[in-house]
Amino acid sequence: MFGLLLLLCLPPALGAVDFSDYENGYQVRLSIKTALGDEAYEWNESEMFLFRATIAFAMRQFTKTEAYGIDNIVVRNQTQRVSFWFIVTSPENPAQTVEKETVEKAIRRSRNRINNAFLLTDKTLEFLGIPPTLAAPISPATPPWLIVFGVVIGLVCAGIVALLTSSVVKRRRGNKAKQLPEEEDPAKGTDKGITCEDRNGVYNQGFSDDDRLTQL
Amino acid sequence: MTKPQNKQHSLTETERERHRKTTEERPKWDNKVQYLLTCIGFAVGLGNVWRFPYLCQVYGGGAFLIPYLIALVFEGLPLLYLELAIGQRLRLGSIGVWNSISPYLGGVGVASMMVSFLVGVYYNTILAWVLWYFFHSFQDPLPWSECPVKEDLQGFVQECVDSTPVNYFWYRQTLNVTSNIETNGSLQWWLVLCLATAWCIVYICFIRGIETIGKAVYITATFPYLVLTIFLVRALTLPGATDGLIYLFTPEWELLKNPRVWLDAATQIFFSLSLAFGGLIAFSSYNSEKNNCERDTLLVGCINSATSIYASISIFAILGFKATTNYNSCVQSNILALTNTFDIEDQNITAENYDSWLVSLNKTDHAKVSSLNLTECKLQTFLDESVSGTGLAFIVFTEAVIAMPGSQVWAVLFFIMLFSLGLSSMFGNMEGVLAPLNDLKVLPKWLPSELISAIIALVSLLVGLVFTMGSGNYWLEIFNNYVGSVSLLLIAFFEIIGVVMFRGMKKFSEDIEFMTGRRPNLFWRVCWMGISPVLLLVIFVAYIVVQAQTTPTYPAWNPDYVDFPQAEVLPYPDWVFAMCVFLVAIPVAPIPIVALYRLISRCCCKTNTTEPSGASNPYANEGFNMDT
């Protein structure tokens, strides 16, 4: 109540009030050069006019009335940064400001439109105190990593099965060959001549004739 | 004495059978290149990429190469030559080889086998983590580049905001790590899947022994070099790469006075060459007898060290780029803070005039500037952030990859490279388990080798499930520090003592002359008989002393910690420390146990000494055994 009296005493058009004390104001900060580099536009009165218009648009969308106009958006303390404070005054009573929460909700709802009007993003057009709504993460039906996993494990299992079956086939063929009588074995002959072989000795294969050198 | 016309006439049925079995069944390399690539692949592993660059950086850059190369020449190469020669001559796995040299040394082979098994179990978990990251590299944007939003879409997950997205992805979404080692957590199903995939891939390469390994190794041993070159070329085009390289290679000669540097160089070369695992012995046992193993030694040893140096060039080019990126964002955040506080026009303060602006603002309004708490941005600080091990691959490098254009490609390449590096090392580990098992002849003949490999892979997978629990990362660090360290030094020491004292330098020189055509020269003999054993003993003692001086602690990731995101340093509980001691003692225990057992059985059963033991080596000619 007392606050309202204070409001009524202050002429709304006077810029004498420091808006950082003001409860329902929001500070806005733009970083145009960071966002657009060489294609950055100059911030002038027309751009400010556009800003006020977009905020009025946001309020209209939120309250679903056509009551809000440019004059309801009051801007103060513009700096070179480019940053400034604004408040939204109520259309019925220009001396009364709209609640902070209402303004916040309105801006959040139309944030995308406001950003696009200025070719900026959430980071380069900051409303201090209004955190950007984070995009809902796109979660596909199957996580992509499971797809890659499925491909890899499928290939590997197919390879294992292929190698095992070829081993089994090879072994069966080898078994069949072994069952053929060993006609080539010359050692069935009798032991002629004197052998130096000691039955209890160990055969020294260090001197074997087998030429199984690995090919270079 | 008539000379038998045809040798087979003079053989009995059983001798012929055994001859056919042993010469048929010992597999052979298709060609020399396969053998060399397999040995190089076994030696070149993850440590070359994430341990050596870290050591180089921490121990004074180019200056570290001096102790490293000295250790290579006097410790690495002699031990490598010893293992390759003894394997090629005696043509058996590690258990068979040491049994042949002396029955008392049989335990050395058993110890090698156990260490190979334990290392294989945890090493494949690292490969499972690499696979997990690989699977996630096909998304845009990469999942570790941004924090996930909370369910109410009001903000980002708090744990991620406090640390970094990369850290969050590693500790929470990959490991889901608990806050200390005593809290086990549950099995993380996604890690179990990745571990099973990793073991399946290892199995498919191992399914027919060296027949399939020899083919697989053409890719796994050569691909890392390709990727390292691609990364190097790419990194050199990025800003800041040269800063990283200059920083890496600037030598600090002062650090050479620190004995720790020499100890770490010696241990690095020892573990880097994968000695004492038994894998190298097994690989060289599949060679022909007349192979020049001296040249192989020089090739494998030098290529391993050259790979380490080449990898560190690539890695540091990337890290230099990352440090520059971090430095730039630090400066930008400072600029933004100043611009916002003083309402200066946008982009008036740039990185170039930042310093002059800061000075002038400080003069006009000192209080306001100091209230901002601006961090002083120095490139050196960012370059100094040195990490090794999994931290380098999964935290630091992934962060660098995000900043590179076309991140997915670089991420995929990087993780495939890590996987091939690890896979070729796993071949050696598995061979170090399978070849001794064949030597022991405990397995029935009708079991096909594919089934034996499958059983070993399955058992390793089941044991490795320990590392997929919430506390798995802590356990892996324990295995990494205790299993793959002290035991290997001891085994290598006994290996060299075994050859020099039990086989004798004279006989070993004859072996080498038989194989290569000339006796080993003075350098090798001096190393084997003197320098290398002494060096190994010194390293072993120094290692134990250093470990004993530091109370064993571990860094834990605890979101509730006061200083989060810094790691909470916790001491190991007593039962965990007992496990550590176990892990060191159990692989090494067979050495004294088998020696004692053989001693006792020899003393008790003196009448039966002439009977050849069941595991007799058909290639060892005991006709010239001086003992009988």
Image (spheres, rainbow, N blue to C red):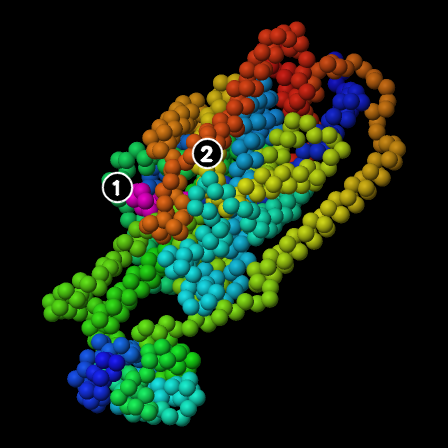
User: Which residue corresponds to mark 2?
Assistant: B576
Callout 2: residue from which chain?
B
Name the amino acid type tagged 2: Val
- The residue under the point 64% across, 10% down is B609
**Quadrant location of the N terminus of chain B?**
top right
Residue A8 visible to an observer of this rendering: yes
Q: Residue at x 49, y 70 (%)?
A: A136
* Bounds of the magenta segment: B50-63
Above or below for B322 versus B348 = above
Q: Amino acid at mark 1?
A: Trp
Q: Is residue A192 left or right of residue B447?
A: right
- Whether B373 is among the magenta residues is no
Task: Identify which residue, B606 or B74, lies in the foreground.
Answer: B606
Q: Image quarter for residue B287? A: top right
What chain is tagged by disc 1? B
- The magenta stretch spans residue B56: yes
Q: Quadrant of the C terminus of chain B?
A: top right
> Which of the two discs, 2 and 1, labels the residue nearer the N terminus?
1
| Residue B164 x/y as whole percent | 39, 58
Q: Is residue B79 left or right of residue B257?
A: right
Where residue B576 sits: x, y (%)? 46, 34
Q: Residue placed farthest to the left in the image?
A: B363
Is B49 displayed left or right of A183 in the figure? left
Q: Residue furthest front?
A: A1
Label 2 to label 1: alpha-carbon separation: 39 Å
Quadrant of residue A153 within the rendered picture:
bottom right
Please, is residue A126 above or below residue B193 in the view? Answer: below
Mark 2 vs mark 1: give the one in front. 2
Q: Is A178 in front, or is B8?
A: A178
Residue hosting label 1: B253
Q: How many marks?
A: 2
